[in-house]
Amino acid sequence: MTAIIMNRFNRAIAGLLLLLAGPQLWAQPSLHNSYWNIHFRQDGTMSRLLTLSHGTWDSVSLAKNDHSGVSWYVNQNGVRQPIRLARYAQNAYDGNFKGIRVGLRYGLNDDKLIIKAVATNTTGQVFRPEKLGLDMGISHYMSAYPQWDAIYFPTMLRCEKTHFWGYMMSPDGRLLGLASPDPVASWSLNYNFGYGDRQVFFWGHRIYSMNLDLLNTAPLPDRHPQDLTRLAPGETRRWTIVLVAVSAPNRVQPVLSRICQAPMIQLKQTTLEPGKTFTIFADHNQGHALRVFSPSGRTWRLRPIRSWADRDEFLFDPGTVAGVYTLVATSHHRITEAKVTIRKPWGWYLRAARDAALQDTQKASYNCESWYGFYSAYLAQQYYPDRRKRQQTDERFGKVIGLMYDTVAGRPLAMTNASRIQNTSTTIGILVDKYRAEGQGSDLILAKKLADRVILQAQSTDGAYRNGKTHYTSVIYIAKSILELAAAEKERGRTDTAWYAAYLRHLRSAKKAVDQLMLGIGAIATEGESTFEDGMVSCTALQIADFALLQDDPKDRARYAQMAEAYLTAHRCLTQLIVPDSRQRNGTLRFWEAQYDVMMGDNMMSSPHGWSAWRAYATYYLYLLTGKEDYLLQTMNAVGTCVQMIDARTGHLRWAFVVDPYVNTVQSCENFPNTGADTYNANQFKAQEGRTRPRIIGEEYVDMVAGWFHANSSDNDVHEIFKCMEEVALGKAYIFERADGGLLAYNCRVVKKGDRLSVTSVDDRLSRIHLNLKNRYILKIAGWPQQTSGPGMTWVSKNKADPVLKKQPAHPRKESTS
């Protein structure tokens, strides 16, 4: 009690001194040096924030109203309450919430903005909030071009046992690092309200701001500190939070490592095939202890193979057991975790995806995501024919497509399918894969009719495919689907002039659409609420790069490739480029689809998600166009991350990996009345319209619902991953020669002896190898004709008569009768 009285006395004296100091001190407070210029309101929230970025002053957009910051808040019983502060000294602010006294202190240290937060329990009872934290007040609200170019997205946020680190990045490439050398319980995002009423509504596609949840109730991911759930009577906790401008994503860990005084694990490759070795770098302080924990419980202690002043290098060979391995680096009582994965053979994932597509019901609806699993089923049939599974797939496909299309006239039966042209383009792509699997010309004829209808009804004079007036070329990828059809038509057109004419017609249509995408991001859009949307950008990049590969003129290839790279560079703020976690690496960031896909009641960040594969197509095409090593690394990390949606131990398919550490939500637990898996589902329900069960989701995979939920669910969009994996990885290997002669190899092992490369692979369908060589070599591959190649980029094929195509055609195989 004496301490409380003395504290109140000290605050009263401080207030009196401020009054005596006169009006100058009570003018709008500010803080500035050569790197920062900050203006504050009287409650401690920032009214202006400028930082020196890339040599120029950058005005950081700040959130408004309920999310002005930096500000304290408390969340109890699902209700968020702000804690108002008042200025009581220079750059110092205090507030009180029912006896929980909180404060903020601001300072500058060269290029670092220092925020010190303190919380004290002055009551006689234990304080156990759901959350007590800071709204950082930096706006992530991306509403339209060009506004969103300068908005920072919360690209990566990560709690460790002993510290916190992460960064925010804008589409125009500016980057703010965020770190604390103190343990932080959790973090969360303030997702925007979307549309509907307050009882039953859909969350929007934007984010107001982010929170550091300094205290957070359990459960939390194991990597997080587990003891920051309460304040005991009389207890005080303190945190230091640092903001700093960083020049590029690859500088985040070195810069924040010094701030946190903690090791940071850097990985170039996060998922590899059995028998490969991981190279691991640990930043900050020589002499790390690095331990590895296998999925089976085995442990290793690694020693560095070389060291520098500020980092160590390790090699880790896990052997051949598939699964996720946890790395733990310790230095001076600071602990950092990372994860790497040994994957199964690519074909194992495709076969498991086919089984999942038969189990998780493919349904007719106005969302093509509801029947996306047919891609996996028919692609698996091309490589691993199975008569019984083919019959099951055909039966279900016939039922679904019969509910949506007049298959004779080639037109949609429902108005929703007529306007949602991505449904029809997706069906075109599935029909092409069904044709390649089964050789039925009727499938290709229907695909051709549907494509002609899309072009007639939806392609505007500027070349864009539109739903009414809304730009839809990059809602999924209309042009790519038409190009997939054109490739099959070109093959038929070698002996049939009518098919060749169809090929030219569809190629011209796709070219018009791609040329319109070349006008830049201001000329494109997406469905739903406008924002700098993951798929809108990645699907634009992939379609431009895909079309570039068809060009014979080097100038045209370069022109299209350059624009695709520009889109992908802006997309970096939505991509997990550095997270040291093989479950997430190169996943893209989406947050509004849990409510549609798996009937959750709230938004949550999913990464990877089925649509993360879209960026992997783009990096793959750009690797073939440019030969840049980083595109190969990104592609293989992305595909390796995404296929882990299938549990390597059980073969069970999940919908997505949720990144948020703690989301207290609900999920539907029964079907809605008058819905059925064998009817056309035209309604988009919200979980709260029916019976729900409570769920707490935190950094974990979320299961599918399509197998039991009969109404619209869009979780079968996960099958985009396996469609991409088939095009990019299955049956293909890659060999990249660095300037120093070192070799990077995927899906194969390479032994170099003089001018000879001996190649082996465990891929049971390996038929093509992409070479990117600095020198000329003789290739020896068991069962293949000997070949000579290099320098430069080229494909080599097991069958020299095969055309050099971007997408390897399936090889006919005898069907299994399992």
Image (tube, rainbow, N blue to C red):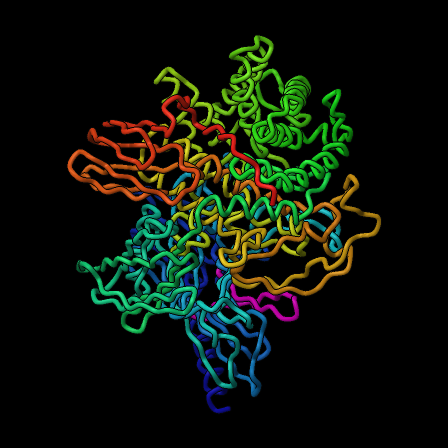
Residue 705, how many percent across, how many down? 67, 53
Residue at 28% x, 61% y is 258
Residue at 48% x, 23% y is 519
Q: Residue furthest bottom?
A: 2
Identify the magenta region: 69-89
Q: Quadrant of the C terminus?
A: top right
Depth check: 676 or 179 in front? 676
Can residue 471 be spotted in the picture? no
Can residue 250 be spotted in the picture? yes
Q: Residue furthest right?
A: 674
Residue 278 to residue 484: above or below: below
Depth check: 47 or 259 in front? 259
Q: Residue furthest left?
A: 754
The answer to which quarter of the image holds residue 463 is top right
Q: Would residue 400 appear left or right of 606 to someone viewing this image?
A: right
Depth check: 330 or 172 in front? 330
Residue 46, how many percent across, how many down? 47, 56
Please check the rendered image and state whether residue 414 is part of the magenta-colored stretch, yes or no: no
Task: Give the total number of marks visible in the rendering.
Answer: 0
Q: Main secondary structure of the magenta part?
A: strand
Q: Would residue 653 appear left or right of 52 to someone viewing this image?
A: right
Residue at 55% x, 29% y is 524
Residue 543, how many percent across, how many down? 49, 28
Q: Would residue 471 appear left or right of 416 to someone viewing this image?
A: left
Q: Would residue 283 appear left or right of 233 to someone viewing this image?
A: left
Residue 281, how many percent across, how many down? 27, 56
Depth check: 784 or 243 in front? 784
Q: Residue furthest top?
A: 497
Residue 46 to residue 577: above or below: below
Residue 51 to residue 116: above or below: above
